[in-house]
Image (spheres, helix red, strand yellow):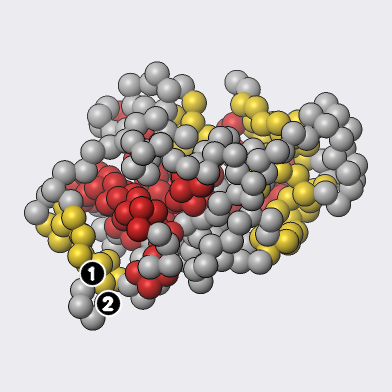
């Protein structure tokens, strides 16, 4: 999704002899990362937020969305499993409750419900755009997700409470689980962790000092930042690549819950000036899972961004120059 890979200087990693933590050295400072499964764990749902699939559906509908009869359901995981504890036999997906004809709009969500760079203009976080022109779109989007996820009065609370607190990407695996991967893939995972932590170090500590009421230090931790980064990696669409802040990222609630299929020829995704849509480019039968293609990516890129590798992927091997950064 992103074309730019950020260079990480003075970064290396070691594993403690006791296996308790991974230690990252970033520009001379150490960050102790727990190896007990808590690294990258998302923030808890704020007290008072009533969370349900029906609540999410009502929220997107009240905002002007149009939905064909759909339901979130469990489907057999058709993706190639990885021999790690995070692998799952079943996955959550979007099911058509009635047949859909070719050309029908399955989902249409107004972009004013979306999260990301453009939406920040309508929130208290606009200061990030007004006062920090050097801040890239990725960091702005991550800060937006993390800020709203911990705000009980957030406009997006019905959506954010549905997000998983633990993501399947190996970025969040323990060292024991990472040892199940081949060395090249493991190196790319470690590199990606370093990239995301470098984003946090370059962005967050300064903001928590300058705007403590907006960005409390105890809520904008490195671990939470990496979780929000994983949300952006796995759920956003990027556009306007010529922006001075890099590609602008957009997360469209409800629509982002549609799973991947390499050959999802029956459904197409499009972003219009006012809304994002899923349109049936072929016949969709009742009970069928609605899926789209996440694009042509190598297996390691799929694993890093989404936590799975597709079955029958035509692009198995990665470009040797692609180190698995934010792209």
One can see residue 261 in this view: yes
Quarter of the image that includes the C terminus: top left
Q: Residue at x 21, y 74 (%)?
A: 16
Residue 232, percent from left and from top = 46, 44
The answer to which of 183 and 41 lies nearer the viewer is 183
Q: Are marks 2 and 1 in contact (CB under 8 Å)?
A: yes
The residue to which callout 2 is attached is 19
Q: Does residue 317 appear to the left or right of 252 in the view shown?
A: left
Residue 64, percent from left and from top = 71, 35
Q: Which mark is residue 50?
A: none
- Mark 1: few/some/many CA within 10 Å (<14, 14-19, 20+): few
Q: Secondary structure at mark 1?
A: strand
Q: Which mark is residue 15?
A: 1
Q: Secondary structure at mark 2?
A: loop
- Mark 2: few/some/many CA within 10 Å (<14, 14-19, 20+): few
The answer to which of 154 and 271 lies nearer the viewer is 271
The answer to which of 123 and 98 lies nearer the viewer is 98
Q: Residue at x 56, y 51 (%)?
A: 309
The answer to which of 72 and 287 lies nearer the viewer is 287
One can see residue 210 in this view: no
Residue 124, percent from left and from top = 39, 40
Q: Does residue 30 appear to the left or right of 222 in the view shown?
A: left
């Amino acid at each position: 999704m992103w074309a730019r890979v950020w260079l990480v200087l003075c970064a290396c990693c070691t594993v403690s002899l006791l296996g308790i933590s991974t230690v990252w050295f970033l520009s001379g400072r150490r960050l102790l990362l727990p190896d007990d499964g808590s690294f990258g764990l998302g923030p808890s749902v704020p007290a008072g937020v009533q969370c349900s699939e029906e609540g999410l559906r009502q929220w997107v509908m009240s905002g002007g969305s149009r939905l064909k009869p759909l339901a979130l359901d469990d489907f057999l995981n058709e993706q190639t499993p990885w021999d790690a504890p995070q692998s799952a036999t079943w996955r959550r997906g979007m099911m058509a409750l009635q047949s859909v004809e070719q050309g029908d709009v399955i989902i249409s969500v107004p972009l004013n419900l979306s999260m990301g760079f453009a939406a920040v203009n309508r929130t208290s976080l606009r200061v990030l755009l007004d006062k920090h022109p050097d801040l890239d779109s990725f960091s702005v989007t991550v800060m937006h997700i993390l800020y709203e996820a911990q705000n009980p009065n957030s406009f997006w609370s019905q959506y954010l409470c549905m997000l998983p607190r633990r993501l399947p990407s190996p970025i969040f695996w323990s060292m024991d689980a990472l040892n199940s991967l081949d060395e090249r893939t493991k190196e790319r995972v470690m590199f990606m962790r370093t990239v995301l932590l470098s984003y946090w170090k370059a962005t967050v500590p300064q903001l928590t000092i300058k705007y403590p009421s907006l960005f409390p230090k105890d809520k904008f931790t490195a671990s939470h930042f990496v979780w929000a980064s994983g949300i952006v990696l796995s759920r956003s669409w990027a556009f306007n690549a010529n922006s001075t802040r890099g590609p602008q990222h957009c997360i469209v609630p409800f629509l982002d819950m549609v799973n991947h299929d390499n050959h999802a020829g029956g459904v197409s995704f499009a972003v219009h000036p006012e809304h994002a849509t899923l349109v049936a480019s072929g016949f969709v039968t009742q009970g069928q899972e609605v899926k789209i293609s996440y694009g042509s990516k190598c297996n390691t890129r799929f694993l890093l961004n989404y936590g799975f590798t597709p079955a029958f992927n035509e692009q198995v091997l990665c470009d040797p120059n692609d180190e698995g950064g934010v792209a």
